[in-house]
Each structure stands twice: as structure tokens, then as C-alpha cells.
Image (spheres, helix red, strand yellow):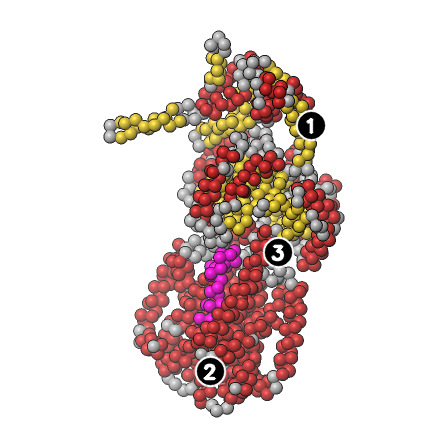
Amino acid sequence: MIRTLITALLHKPIAVFMSAGLVLIFGVISFQQIKFALLPNIEYPRLTILTKFENSSAVEVENLVTKYLTDSLNTVPRIEQIESDSYQGLSIVRIRFKYGTDLAISTLEVREKLDQIRDLLPRDASRPLITRFNPGESPFMQIAFTFKNAEDERKLRPYLEENVLFYFERIEGVASVQVSGGYKKEILVEIDPERMNFYRTTIDEIKHKIISQNKNIPAGQLPYGNKELLIKTKSQFESLEDIKNLIIGSTPNFERFNLSDISEIKEVFKKKQSYVRYNGKDAVILSLYKESSRNSFALSKEVKQVIKDQNDIFGKLLNYEIIFNESDYIESSINSLILSLVIGAFLAYLSLLIILKNTISPTLLVITIPISIISSILIFRFIGISLNLMSMGGLAIGIGMLFDSSNVVLSGIERNLHLGKNLQDSVIEGVVEVFGSVSSATLTTIIVFLPLVFLESLVGILFSEMAFSIIIIILVSYIISFSFLPVTTMVLYKFRKDNQESRFLLYRIFDEERIKQKYVRFLQILLKNPSRLFILLLIGLFFSLITIIFLDLDFLPKISTGRYVLRVEFPKGSPLHLMNEKSQLLEQEIRGKFNRDYFTIVSRDELEILKNPNLQKEKYMVQIEFSLGKNEDSLISEILDKLNKKSDFLNLKIWIEEKGDLLSQLVLFRRDVINLEITGESPVTISEAGYNLKNKLESNPKVLFVRLGMDTQEPELLIESDPLKLASFGLLNQNIADIIKMGLRGEDVSKYKVNANETDIRVHLKDTNIKEAKDLLGLRLLTRSGENLALGNVINYKESTAYPSIQRSGSNIVNNVYIRLQDGDSSTREEILNIFKSEMNRKDILVLPSDEIRQIESSMVELMLTLALSTIIVYMVLSGIFETFAVSFIMLLSAPLVIIGTIPFILISGSSLNVSSFIGMILLIGVLVDNASLFYEYFSIYSKTNSSLNDSILLAAQEIFRPVLMNNSTTILGMLPIAFGLGFGTEFQFPLSIVVISGLVISTFASLYLVPIFFHIYFRNK
């Protein structure tokens, strides 16, 4: 069949070239249309439920809200883990489902369970809000705005919201725009207590009036000819005058009084809860979020065009700077990979020039690269794979392997030419001769990666696209090697000139015949006495296995984004103005040392948790974000040393960490962080255990800081009321809580909407002047009988303590321990864990690794099982192809020896054992099997014509000498640029490239020496 196909193709060269041209045209069109992204489209199976229960302690939130939520959700199908955090005024429940779960259905099931227990929650608790965690839903662009001149900084945010924001919101593909920093406006209703009591009204009545009147209510439909007319009552506030003229009630004399009669109503700026600055100036940051189907590149261009078009409108008043653009990092990463591809292809071409000693043959092979890549991109486009770090990484791996099939086909053609056959017969016979071995080699390589595609864990989600891209490009190169390559060879070989060593110095570097003769002589020696070789291999294998002890174990390699964050943690209770002053001193140090653009966030308010529920509720934090180049990491230790020596920053915890990419949001494992959980019988027990451990660890110089989920209890004020007195005055605890709340900060009761902007309406008691606890006793409220009563008559107060948060994992209360190390080498981690074990050796508590660590350990076990499964499947396929169990086993026998090359090189390179390096080992299995099957193919051919086993072994070894050198050298050189880490985005493939390069060096030795020796021993004894 293959003979007929090749003969037909050789008679239709124009049709073959035109077909290749069509593929290139459609491939280029697909490249322009394909989606670019940092990572594959990942649906992380996790839901977060947020429930606000304002003015409640963590214990009350836990008992009255969180417990009901978690108990009701336990019966939802496919749940793996439920975790909860109960803070003051806020409940956060996180649900993690099994991978492969349909989140749309699970969300409906969760909503149904929550609706069933809604009546069991407190009346003041908000409706539970369900949010999905999607790492791809981080902002694709952030823009910082500042005033050009010395304008009132309080006007910046309102100006942006009223005049600029809608230009970005209306861009097609922009899902939402969030505003951070600046001053927010609010409508302040300051109630005069005396006038409120004079008119005999209450806080509850005022709140109820504002809420009920500030809405348009549907009232049904009225027949209107052939249509129906919608009816609604219109009372929503449209101006400040509408709020002032709101009728609250009437006096005993039937005189109506308005809200303005008992309060002062004005538009003011809210008290700042955080500061945002860009390069030292007060700024407002717009964070733009894209629709999931949109291309980051195209959308970024549209946003930049809008800024350019509208610059005439706001450019005279505002400065703007794009401080983050996801497409820049994606573009940089992809450009780095493309550069690695080009350099790798060029180096592979040079190696082919040296080995083949003519320009036609290497050019033939190099021509297949763009055709294979563009054809692969065409397939990506149709099956929905985007160009991202994973798929591009697969293409980078495939560059070296692209030559494998074509090398073997070309070697078969060359062999027949050297036998004196004419060009057409040589092409046909050469292709037919190697068709079986190339097909089996391609099949085994595909099978090696196939198990990754079927994994439903995080490993499978992340690496299925890489596996798919490798499989696709190998299949494409396989098809090209048996269609386009033979036809092109037939055309171009007519112009080939051999034996050009004397003309080009480059061709003299590699004397194939002389090296082959030495190889054959050495192989003859080893065939006679292989024992010494086996002893050396066993010694090498032993020392390589020992080396594993010194390797660090990671889940994923660290991917550099070039963005760093200087974090400063202040003592609890630090005033915001002090944090702001210290942050300005830090900015001066950053500006003096780095001379980089930076932006600063001082503290964070509760709204930011609602935007990103995965954040911890850290109220006393300063963050300064800046960028560094590829080789400027050394500056970090310099600035930290300088800051830690300054007296201004004593007693502050200061550290710098690289801002994580999307992968770090998915996988929370870091070598410089240890996460553990302490569980026990009571919150007091695990809190004390955590506190004692924290004091012990923070005295260790290798520990930067320790943070506890359940820290020591914080002070609180308990208001106690006399039930009999309350009943006699017709009052409830809710009335007491309301008047105290209004006397302190007040309460946001409704929204004032103008166009698309919403402003909070806050009700607050005027001139309460509450500075300490005893001032609460002077607050007054109206009783049911009309008496103006001071709170001191019905309440007392006392100081107490309570936990600021309560955390659960499943049904157990846990104290999460977050340990940040100075460095993350294995010895440091082991030392800290030993301290932990010695301190926690108690019967009343249990210490477990965090849920993230358990997930990672499970994924690593799954990956090792995948490696074993790939080996077993390859063995089964080889046995089926060659109809022999023994020969298939011999082909796989040299696979464990790649450890001799890979493990020491991983250690020397400073890398770690991680998913990327494991995938490299999976790849090596395929390469080793390919070479072994090629040897067996030629051995079978020569065994039919030679009676001597030695002669058959040596002749087959000589035949595979060139293909093995060509295949391994092109793959090694193709991956060499990735090993040097040219630019951002190549870090993920770095461990893989180290494993493949070092493994292929050993593979060359194994394929040329060990495989022939193993076959010689087997067939000699047989």
C-alpha cells in the first residue's frame, strides 16, 4: 500500500506542492485568528460563598451563619472539600469539587441548598453570594490616572467615574471595569437626635422610609389595544432635593415633616480606608476585565486606541499610565519561545550540515519545519487550542522531534542511493524500508503522551494541551515525511553534489566514516566482554539515585513575571495615617534604588475581599509593586538589607516576593512557604498551640515570619441590657444595636443612582462625639410611650476578648499555620518541619499538611503512575507490533538508565524535580524506544541475509549510527535555547529541556551500545 501511495505521489509533484501551499495559506489565516493566552482555558472547580453579617463577632458569624451553610452543602454531589472562614461581619465558604465537574449544574445545586436554609439565617445577614474562582478572570489591563496639576485629589475618582469610565465600559469585549483608590462620594443624612425625638420618630422609621421610597415598583400590566402596557410606580430619587423632601411622617397636629426637617443632607466624600499612589502621586486605578472568549491582544489594542482617541478630552487634565498589560507578558513569553524555536531550528540545521555534508539534504529537512508548525496551528484553530505557554511549549519540544521521522526516511533513501540504485527507486525503496519502524516509533511517542490527555486532575487540565500539541506536531511531521519529503527529495536531489568536504571547512568537523569505524571497533570489544560496562552503569545508577536525596521537589517550576511586590506588615491596630507615612518613606527608598515606575496600596477595605475572595482579610498591609528585568534579582536583597537596617522600619515585617502568574493562583505550593493545619478539640487548644509555635519559630533566623489563622483573641466590647427594663420601655435589643450603630459610623441604607453611577446613602446621628465606651451611655432613643431615654438606663458594658476569625476544614475547626522562610531549600524546610513535629507532639491536637499540599502530593503520585502506565502501554504496543514479548522488553530495558544523565544535571542546573521534568522523562521513554525499534528493524533485515549474529548486530548498528546521531543532535540543539532561558516565559520548559538534553546524551550511548549488546546477549543465548 505504501509503495503504491509513494509511486502515485512521485508522479504528481505539482499537486503535492499546491496542497502544501494551500495548507500554508490557511495556516497563516488561522494564525491571525487564533486566540493568544497565557494558559489554556482552565475551569477551576471551586465556588466561594460570601455572606455579610455586619457588626457580628467571628464566633457569632460561625454559629449563626457559617455552620448552617456548611451543614446544608455537605450533601451536594461531587464535593471534595469544604473550607470556611468566619470573620467579624463576614462568612466565606469555599467549596472544591472534583475535576471534571460541570460547575453550571453544581452552582444551581448549591443555590438550591442555600435557598432551603435562607430562613434559618439571621434577618440582618445578607443573601449568600456565590462566586466562581476563575484564574483567567484577573484583569487583563490596569491603568493608573493622576492629575497633571495640583488639583484637589478628592475630585479625581468622581471625575473618572463621570467622564472617563464609560469609554472603557462600552468597548466590545470588556466585561467590567473596577475602580480602586481615590475618594468615593456618599450622600450623608446626619440626623439631629433632638429634632428626631421632637417629631417622635425613630431610626427604624427613617431607614424604612428611605429604603421603601427609593425604588420604582412594577404594578402589573394594562391592556393597550393589541399590546399590554407595563405599569410601575415611580418614586426613585433623582436629585438631592428628592431626598430632602422625603416625607417621614406627621405630628399630632397633622403637620407633615420631611427628612430635611430632622437632618442635614449633603454630598460628601467618604472617609478613606486605603491609599493608592502611582510614582508617589495619589492615583486611581482602573482594572479592566475581559470576556472569556476575547483575545487579549486584540482587546489591548482597542483599549489603547480608545485612550489615544479620548486623550484630547481628558489629556489636558490627567496623566495616565498602563501599569499592567497581560498581552505584553503573553507577547514577551511567546516571542521568547518563538526566538527559541528559530535558534533551535538553526542549530539543528547546522548539525545536519555537518553530518550530511551537503546543503540539499539539511534544507529538505528544514523546509518541513514551517510546514509542520503552520499545519499544527491550523489544526489548533479547528479543535479550539489557543497559543499559550503550554501549547507553544509543546511546539518547542516538537521542533527537535520534527526531524526524527524525516531523518529516518532520508537515511533510508541515502542507503539505497549508496547501493547504486537510481533516484526514483531509491526514494521508493527507502520509504518502504523504514515505513514500519517510523510508524511504530511515531505510535509509541504518541502513546507515551496519551495518558496525560485523559487525566482529570490539575495536571491533566494544565498539560493536556501540551500533550495534544506534541501529538499533533508529531503526527503532522509523520505525514509530511511520507508525502511532501519524498516528492521534494525527488526534485531537489537532482541538483545535489556529494563529497564537498574539501570545499567547506564546516564539513570537515565531523568525519563520519572514521568515527563510525572507531564506534564499530569499540562495539566489537563490548560485545565480547560487556561485564565491565554493566558494572560502570550500575555504579553510575547508584550514585544518581543517591543524588535524588539532594533534589528539591516542586509541583511546578517557578515562572518569572518580572513583577515584584514589596510587602510590609504592620502590627495589628496600626492607624492608617501611620501606615501611609511609612509607605511614603518606603517609596523614596524604592525610587532611589530601582528608578522604576511603581504603585502603592496602603491597607485594603472589605470590598476588595468581595472582588477577590481568595485574599486573606489583611487590614494592616502596605504593598508597593514594581518591575525588574530578567537579570536584576540581585537588587532585591540589596534593598531588603537597606530597609531592615533603617530605624524607621524597625518592628515591621518587610519582604519582597515575585508577583505570581496565573499558575501560582492555581498551585499555592512554594518552596519558601510551609502551610500546615492544626486541629484539636477546642479553639482555645489549637489557638494556644499555634501561638506557642509562632513564638518558637520566629526566633529562628531562617524564618521570615509566621502567620496564624486563629491568632490570639482580640479585645471587644459587650453590651448587656436588662430584659425587664427593655420590656417595660417597649424596646428590643435590635433598637439598642441600631442606635449604637448610628452613633458610631452610621449605616448605608440605600443607593442614589444618577445615570450609571451609584452613590451610597448613609444615615448617621449628628454630633454624637463618641470617643470611648462610656460615651455610648449618653445616646438617647425614643421609647414606645414617647419618653426620650438615655441608653445608660437600660444597658451596661464590659470588655471581653474574641477570636478575629474561625476557620474550618470539613467539619473540623483548624488553625492554619503559614510559615514564610528566608529561603526554600530542602534542608531549611526539613529543619522547620522537625521543630514543628517536636513542638506539636501532643495527644490533644493533630497536625496535617494543608489541603493545597495534599492536592499537590496526590497530583505528583498521579504523574508517577502516568509515567509507569505510559511505559506499560508502550510495552504492550511494541509486543503487538513485533509479536514478541522478549524483544519488546529488551527495547525498554535501557530506559531506567536515563536517570544516570538526568538526575545529576537537574541538581547541577539548580532546577528541581517537578511536573515539567517528569514530562521530560516521559518524552525520553519514547525516544529510547524509537531508536531501539529502528535497530531491531535493520537487525531483522540483515539477519535474513547473514548467518553470523555478530555481523547482523554490527551491520544494524552501522545503519542506525547516522539516524541516531541526527535525531538526538537535532533534538538536543533544538531545545538548547530553552535551556538557556531566553526571556520570560521559557522557565516552565527549562526543567524539561535539562532532562531531555541530558537524557538524550545518555540515550545516544544507550541506543548505540546498550541496545546492540542486549540483543546480542538475548539472541546468543536463544
Crowding near pointer 2: few (<14 within 10 Å), some, many (20+)? many
> Is residue 394 visible in the rendered structure shown here?
no
* Position of residue 2 in the picture relative to residue 471 (left or right): left
- In the displayed structure, would residue 596 be above or below residue 723? below
Most extreme residue toward the left is: 226
Q: The residue tagged with tag 3: helix, strand or loop?
A: loop
> Distance of mark 2 from mark 3, alpha carbons?
50 Å
Q: Quadrant of residue 492?
A: bottom left
Q: Specify start and end residues of the magenta stretch as a single range.
A: 441-466
The residue sitting at the bottom extreme is 947
The residue identified by callout 3 is 631
Q: Position of residue 90 (x, y in %)?
A: 57, 37
N-terminal label among 2 and 1 = 1
* Most foreground residue, 453 or 13: 453
**Can residue 823 be seen from the camera position used here?**
yes
Is 782 on the left or on the right of 825, as rendered?
Answer: left
Predominant SS along the magenta part: helix
Disc 1 or disc 3, which is closer to the eye?
Answer: 1
As shown in the figure, which amino acid type bears the numbered disc 1?
A: Lys
Check disc 2 and report the residue beneath it: 938
Residue in view at x 72 percent, y 40 percent: 648
> Outermost residue, front direction?
724
Q: Circles 2 and 1: CB distance less than 8 Å? A: no
Q: Position of residue 892 (x, y in %)?
A: 53, 75
Q: Earlier in the sequence, mark 2 or mark 3?
A: 3
- Element at badge 2? helix
The residue pinned by badge 1 equals: 798
Q: Which of marks 1 and 3 is nearer the N terminus?
A: 3
Q: Residue at x 54, y 42 (%)?
A: 70
| Residue 195 part of the magenta segment | no
Residue type at mark 2 is Tyr
Category of crowding for the residue at label 1, using alpha-carbon neighbours closer than 10 angstroms: few (below 14), some (14–19), many (at least 20): few
